[in-house]
Image (cartoon, rainbow, N blue to C red):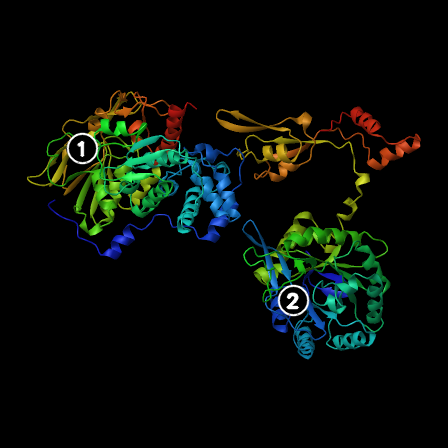
């Protein structure tokens, strides 16, 4: 990077990465809980991918049965703290709240769930469930992200001997490494890891399949395997200058920030983030909060096609991130490190197969923007190395194909869930997949 | 011009809003401050026997996050020196000649003691006396308060002692802790009372602490029954006020008390026969300032309804009160749900299904739930519209033609005329004739 943004003081970093949504006090949680109508057959429960009995857990807050409330939540979702903080509630549970039809503020379900689960961890994580007697079967889980954790916890309750194999030193997957710190801190994710471990799940870190252990060996050690590896590295831009110093993948950048050693993370004075998904917004706002003077998001389509949620877009705007719509990079400029980015303006033409207007470059509209850093946020690749080593997996569009009921892959012994089967959705989807897959594994091994 | 003034058995007040005899009317400071805010009168906190209070005195009842829907107390009558009270009453009346200053009294059941305090109180220049026959705790154990109000003979006797020496109107404040409120009311009338005030607090235990097993409030670990007030007692008070207002043997002006927090509550008491209303808990919760909305709200309501004075309003709902035996059995309503207003909380469905007569179906339409009333099975109980959180979404629609009426009393009389007994079979035949299905 030519120009590094000036480092901030520790206090400034802490302030910049402070939580977006403050926690409820007990009184305000009870008051909010009392506002809930306690709908029957409620739309919020249906809208939640893990189908938490939302009015049920909220009613228990009102009666201060917080342990019971935690039980209601956790029996549906093993990573309920991360979900409470990171879920796009506007488009899920809170978006379905009947108060919206009444033109009133929906119940703050996410914050209430967070209140309950934080209280649960604060109370020392009392045992809520009793596992079935050991059934003599063992399952190996690849990846300790939300899908792997959910699958492991559920399997442990079903009586399995469960071992998670995690490539990184610290477990938790994207919950630990991939969510902006102003939403979820690493410590939150690690509490959920502890919860799963408390039911007897073993976690082996720094184990990469194909390196420290082959898939074959792993498979021989277990009666079933669950793959919850998420996606691989960020997609390349496929333009000249991509290998210059100062070009970084969004996930890799976010990981550095997640380590919470803020002053160690280098960020340019002027930063271009390519792509306009939710990860792109995370990277852009994090760069801004690390002290970058100017952060811009460059996106080849228009605002209406932008995959980022509206509230994420607004957050970026609030942080002062600027947007270049209908703009595409054609070259990263620089001798050793990034000095600028050349872009071309795009026009939107006919609809593509997904019903979005296809962007086409406008000849002669090239222009240069001086930047010191480029963050690639146009999606993640499939982890083909690992998946290629597993026999009989069926992969379509970079996603593992599974049975929608059992989550079984083309290889009957192998199950999968999370981003590696859906191409990248929410934590809550991964949590649901993992839990369901556990029951799929049970059915596979015990026939029911 | 709207006139809110009242004349209560000769006691004049610019509006019907009085402070009840309670902590807010404890001192000249408080009563004068209340008058500045607009209160029409005060019933000075009961003076009488030497007493001493304890800590803590109150227990609050919260409901679903709403504070103080009920307030329980073990506070006694005024524990301030009686001489200070007399002085301050006189001073307050001197400063506020246009407001009603009534003094609540309670002493031991001795004629001489009553005579003495009545005379000394009248010397302050106050407008009226209110005899406290209501306190259900602390004083009752000493033979005062509700111990008097619960025994009609005492009620009459003490009232006589007071009225035989009093030169100003005497109100009797009644306890609701009785079977039939009309009986002590008649006793008070027989004793010469000029008016009644009801209700005093209801005997109660407000709650138990689940950690310490102590009662609320806890007085160094001990507790006991107290007097319940606040919004939750209003329905009980309304009923008792109406019972007394309808009793031709009583026929006295009534000061309505119990859970009045705003002008709407006050109006309900007035419509059921109250001349003035008294307020305590709402003031303890929010301060004297609440009277501003009470005056304004009542005035605007009267303007809107075309009333000029409270005399035109008082008791207007009494004619609506009747016995169950005189209700029309042929009146038939069914619930109708406005699907455009429905927000799909489905509370009507589950309430009807589990708590009533299983006539609201829950179906799925375009991925959304929809509630549909099977009108032929609806008994018109009204539960669904009561639980519905959306204004105007569920209404009870009248479906009988209103041409025929038959009350229970008439039905029984019909059978009597035919010299037959009322049996289930005959009742069913009657219902069948009018197409009434029982579910």
Q: Which mark is residue A211?
A: 1
Q: Is residue B407 above or below residue B200?
A: above
- Position of A110 with respect to A399 (left or right) is right
Q: Is residue B265 above or below residue B170?
A: above
Residue located at (40% from left, 25% from top): A446
Q: Which chain is disc 2 placed on?
A: B
Q: How many labels, in total?
A: 2
Looking at the picture, how far across and down is residue B298, in whole percent? 65, 54
Q: What is the quadrant of residue B220 in the picture?
A: bottom right
Circle 2 SS class: loop
Q: Residue B270, can we see it?
A: yes
Task: Sort mark 2 into few (<14), some (14-19) or many (20+) by Cα contacts within 10 Å.
Answer: many
Q: Which chain is disc 1 placed on?
A: A
Residue nearest the observer in this picture, B431 or A120: A120
The Cα–Cα distance between marks 2 and 1, rounded to whole angstroms, is: 78 Å
Task: Sort mark 1 into few (<14), some (14-19) or many (20+) by Cα contacts within 10 Å.
Answer: few
Residue located at (73% from left, 31% from top): B332
Q: Is residue B178 above or below residue B397?
A: below
Q: What is the quadrant of residue B410 in the picture?
A: top right
Residue located at (13% from left, 28% from top): A364
Residue under label 2: B75
Looking at the picture, how far across and down is residue B177, in whole percent? 75, 57
Viewport quadrant of the C terminus of chain B: top right
Looking at the picture, how far across and down is residue B415, in whole percent? 89, 31
**Closer to viewer: mark 2 or mark 1:** 1
């Amino acid at each position: 990077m030519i120009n590094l943004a000036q480092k901030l003081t520790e206090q400034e970093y802490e302030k910049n990465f402070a939580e977006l949504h403050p926690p409820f006090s007990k009184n305000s949680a009870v008051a909010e809980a009392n506002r809930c109508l306690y709908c029957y057959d409620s739309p919020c429960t249906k809208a939640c991918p893990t189908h938490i009995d939302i009015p049920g857990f909220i009613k228990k807050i009102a009666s201060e049965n917080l342990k019971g409330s935690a039980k209601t939540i956790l029996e549906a979702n093993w990573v309920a703290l991360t979900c409470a903080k990171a879920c796009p509630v506007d488009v899920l549970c809170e978006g379905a709240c009947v108060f919206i039809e009444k033109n009133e503020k929906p119940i703050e379900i996410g914050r209430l769930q967070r209140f309950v689960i934080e209280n649960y961890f604060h109370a020392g994580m009392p045992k809520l469930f009793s596992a079935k007697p050991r059934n003599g079967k063992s399952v190996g889980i690849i990846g300790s992200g939300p899908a792997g954790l959910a699958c492991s916890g559920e399997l442990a309750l079903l009586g399995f001997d469960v071992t998670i194999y995690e490539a990184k030193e610290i477990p938790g997957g994207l919950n630990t490494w991939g969510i902006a710190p102003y939403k979820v801190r690493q410590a939150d994710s690690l509490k959920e890891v502890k919860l799963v471990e408390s039911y007897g799940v073993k976690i082996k870190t720094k184990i990469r399949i194909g390196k420290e252990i082959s898939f074959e060996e792993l498979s021989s050690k277990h009666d079933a395997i669950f793959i919850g590896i998420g996606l691989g590295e960020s997609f390349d831009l496929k333009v000249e200058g991509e290998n210059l110093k100062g070009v970084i993948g969004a996930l890799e950048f976010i990981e550095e920030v997640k380590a919470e050693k803020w002053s160690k993370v280098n960020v340019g004075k002027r930063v271009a983030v390519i792509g306009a998904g939710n990860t792109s917004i995370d990277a852009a706002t994090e760069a801004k909060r690390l002290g970058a003077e100017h952060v811009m998001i460059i996106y080849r389509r228009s605002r209406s096609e932008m995959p980022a949620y509206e509230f994420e877009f607004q957050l970026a705007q609030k942080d002062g991130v600027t947007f270049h719509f209908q703009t595409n990079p054609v070259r990263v400029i620089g001798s050793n490190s990034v000095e600028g980015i050349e872009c071309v303006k795009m026009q939107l033409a006919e609809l593509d197969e997904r019903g979005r207007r296809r962007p086409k470059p406008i000849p002669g509209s090239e222009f240069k923007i001086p930047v010191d850093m480029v963050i690639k946020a146009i999606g993640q690749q499939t982890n083909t190395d690992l998946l290629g080593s597993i026999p009989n997996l069926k992969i379509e569009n970079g996603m593992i194909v599974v049975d929608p009921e059992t989550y079984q892959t083309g290889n009957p012994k192998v199950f999968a869930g999370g981003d590696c089967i859906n191409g990248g959705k929410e934590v809550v989807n991964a949590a649901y997949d993992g839990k369901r897959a556990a029951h799929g594994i049970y059915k596979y091994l015990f026939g029911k | 011009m709207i006139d809110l003034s009242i004349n209560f058995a000769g006691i004049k007040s610019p509006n019907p809003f009085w402070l009840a005899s309670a902590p807010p009317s404890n001192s000249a400071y408080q009563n004068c401050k209340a008058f500045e805010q607009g209160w029409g009168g005060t019933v000075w906190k009961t003076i009488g026997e030497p007493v001493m209070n304890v800590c803590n005195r109150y227990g609050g009842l919260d409901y679903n996050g709403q504070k103080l829907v009920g307030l329980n107390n073990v506070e006694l009558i005024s524990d301030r020196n009686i001489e200070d009270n007399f002085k301050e009453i006189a001073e307050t009346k001197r400063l506020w000649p246009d407001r009603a200053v009534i003094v609540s009294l309670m002493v031991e059941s001795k004629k001489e003691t009553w005579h003495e305090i009545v005379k000394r109180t009248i010397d302050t220049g106050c407008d009226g006396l209110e005899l406290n026959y209501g306190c259900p705790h602390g004083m009752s154990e000493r033979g005062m308060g509700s111990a008097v109000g619960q025994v009609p003979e005492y009620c009459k006797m003490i009232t006589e002692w007071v009225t035989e020496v009093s030169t100003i109107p005497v109100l009797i404040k009644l306890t609701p802790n009785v079977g039939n409120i009309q009986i002590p009311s008649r006793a008070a009338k027989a004793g010469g009372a000029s008016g009644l005030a009801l209700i005093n607090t209801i005997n109660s235990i407000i709650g138990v602490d689940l950690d310490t097993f102590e009662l609320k409030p806890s007085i160094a670990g001990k507790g006991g029954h107290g007097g319940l007030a606040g919004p939750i007692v209003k329905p009980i008070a309304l009923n008792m006020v109406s019972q007394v207002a309808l009793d031709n043997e009583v026929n006295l002006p009534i000061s309505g008390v119990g859970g009045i927090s705003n002008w709407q509550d006050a109006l309900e008491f007035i419509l059921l026969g109250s001349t003035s209303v008294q307020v305590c808990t709402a003031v303890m919760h929010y301060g004297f300032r609440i009277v501003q909305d009470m005056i304004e709200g009542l005035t605007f309501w009267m303007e809107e309804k075309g009333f000029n004075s409270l005399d035109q309003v008082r008791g207007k709902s009494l004619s609506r009160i009747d016995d169950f035996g005189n209700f029309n059995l042929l009146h038939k309503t069914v619930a109708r749900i406005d699907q455009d207003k429905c927000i799909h909380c489905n509370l009507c469905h589950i309430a009807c299904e589990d708590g009533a007569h299983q006539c609201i179906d829950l179906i799925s339409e375009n991925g959304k739930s929809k509630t549909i009333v099977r009108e032929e099975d609806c008994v018109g109980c009204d539960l669904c519209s009561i639980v519905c959180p959306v204004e105007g979404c569920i209404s009870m629609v009248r479906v009988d033609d209103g041409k025929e009426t038959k009350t229970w009393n008439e039905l029984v009389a019909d059978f009597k005329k035919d010299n037959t007994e009322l049996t289930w079979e005959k009742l069913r035949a009657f219902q069948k004739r009018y197409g009434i299905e029982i579910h």
